[in-house]
C-alpha cells in the first residue's frame, strides 16, 4: 500500500479565538479512518494558535529564537498527541494500527513506518516549520504525494482572503515556486505554506503536492482519493497541484 503524508495546519484545528475546532477535528478523524482503506497515512500536525501564543510568551520572557522554536515544536507534538489519542478512542487496534507515540526524529518514522497504518508527527528541530517536517518525512518514507491542508482552496496569485479576483493555480511547477521565492516575490499564501528548503526536497524527491482547503475534510478526502485514482481533473477543480 502506498504512503500519503498529510500536513494539517494548526489553523485548521483551532478557531480564531483559540478554542479547539472539535467539529472539524472529528470530521478529519473520520476521513483518516476512510483513507486508511487506500493508503498508509503519516499525519504531520502544526502548532497553530497555541504555538504562536507560547512563542509570544517566550519572547516576552526573552527566550531566544531557538528556544521559541522549541516551544512551537512541543506544542505541535502536543496537538499531534491529541489527534492520536482521539483516533485511538474511535477505532480498535485490530482495525487500524496507530503508532502510540509521537516520533522524535525522521529516522524513528522510517524505522516504524512499515508496521503502522497511521503515524502522527509534530515538529522535529528548530529552524523549520511543520511543512518542512512533512516534506522530510515524505522523502524518507518514499511517499508519492504530500497533501497539505490549509485554510484556502489552493495556491493563488494573490491573497484570496483580501482580493476577490485572486486566481487559483490549478497546476504549478515547483520551479516556478522556487524562482518566485528566489526573486523574493513569493505568491500570496505560499510564504506561510512553504520555505525554500521544503520546495527543494519536493523537487529532488519528485513529490506531487496537493494544496487544498482542510476546513472541508470531505472535499479534501475526495481530492486525495482522486489523486490516487489518477483523476487529476477532479484534483485541480478543488485544489492546486504542484508538479515537478
Ligand atoms: P508550524 O508553523 O508549522 O505550525 O509550527 P502550523 O500551525 O502548521 O502553522 P500554520 O497554521 O501553517 O501557520 C509551529 C512552530 O513550531 C516551530 C516553529 O517555530 C513553527 O513556527 N517548529 C515546528 C520548529 O521549529 N521545527 C519544526 O520541525 C516544526
Image (spheres, helix red, strand yellow):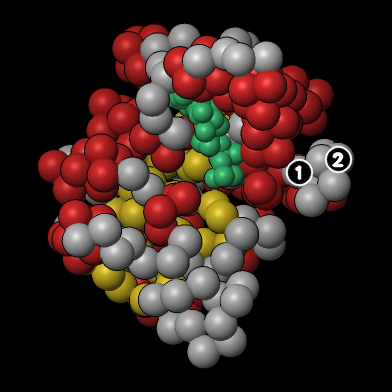
Percent of width and height locating residue 226: 44, 65
Confirm or deny contact between disc 1 and disc 2 (CB under 8 A): yes
Q: Residue at x 19, y 43 (%)?
A: 200
Q: Which residue is mark 2?
A: 19
Give the spatial CA distance, label 1 vs label 2: 6 Å
Visible residue check, residue 191: yes
Q: How many marks?
A: 2
Q: Residues within 10 Å of mark 2 (few under 14, many from 20)?
A: few
Percent of width and height locating residue 174: 22, 59
Q: Is residue 41 above or below residue 160?
A: above
Percent of width and height locating residue 54: 69, 24
Q: Secondary structure at mark 2?
A: loop
Q: Residue at x 39, y 76 (%)?
A: 157
Q: Secondary structure at mark 1?
A: loop
Left or right of residue 105: residue 101: right
- Find residue 14 and name its label: 1
Spot the residue most to the bottom: 165
- Find residue 134 and name its label: none
Visible residue check, residue 91: no
Q: Residue at x 49, y 42 (%)?
A: 6
- Sequence-earlier tag: 1 or 2: 1
Left or right of residue 38: residue 174: left
Amino acid at each position: 500500500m502506498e504512503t500519503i503524508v498529510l500536513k494539517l495546519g494548526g489553523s485548521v484545528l483551532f478557531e480564531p479565538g483559540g478554542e479547539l475546532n472539535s467539529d472539524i477535528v472529528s470530521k478529519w478523524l473520520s476521513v483518516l479512518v476512510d483513507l486508511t482503506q487506500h493508503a498508509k497515512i503519516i499525519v504531520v500536525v502544526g502548532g497553530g494558535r497555541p504555538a504562536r501564543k507560547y512563542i509570544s510568551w517566550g519572547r516576552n520572557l526573552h527566550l531566544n529564537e531557538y528556544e521559541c522554536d522549541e516551544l512551537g515544536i512541543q506544542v505541535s507534538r502536543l496537538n499531534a498527541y491529541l489527534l492520536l489519542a482521539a483516533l485511538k478512542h474511535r477505532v480498535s487496534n485490530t482495525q487500524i494500527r496507530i503508532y502510540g507515540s509521537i516520533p522524535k526524529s525522521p529516522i524513528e518514522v522510517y524505522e516504524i513506518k512499515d508496521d503502522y497504518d497511521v503515524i502522527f508527527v509534530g515538529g522535529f528541530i528548530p529552524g523549520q516549520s511543520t511543512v518542512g517536517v512533512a516534506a522530510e518525512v515524505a522523502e524518507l518514507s518514499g511517499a508519492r504525494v504530500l497533501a497539505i491542508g490549509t485554510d484556502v482552496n489552493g495556491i493563488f496569485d494573490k491573497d484570496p482572503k483580501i482580493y476577490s479576483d485572486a486566481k487559483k493555480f490549478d497546476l504549478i511547477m515547483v520551479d516556478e515556486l522556487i524562482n518566485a521565492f528566489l526573486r523574493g516575490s513569493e505568491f500570496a499564501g505560499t510564504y506561510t505554506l512553504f520555505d525554500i528548503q521544503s520546495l527543494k526536497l519536493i523537487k529532488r524527491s519528485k513529490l506531487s503536492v496537493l494544496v487544498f482547503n482542510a476546513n472541508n475534510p470531505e472535499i479534501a478526502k475526495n481530492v486525495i482519493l482522486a489523486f490516487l485514482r489518477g483523476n487529476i481533473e477532479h484534483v485541480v477543480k478543488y485544489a492546486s497541484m504542484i508538479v515537478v
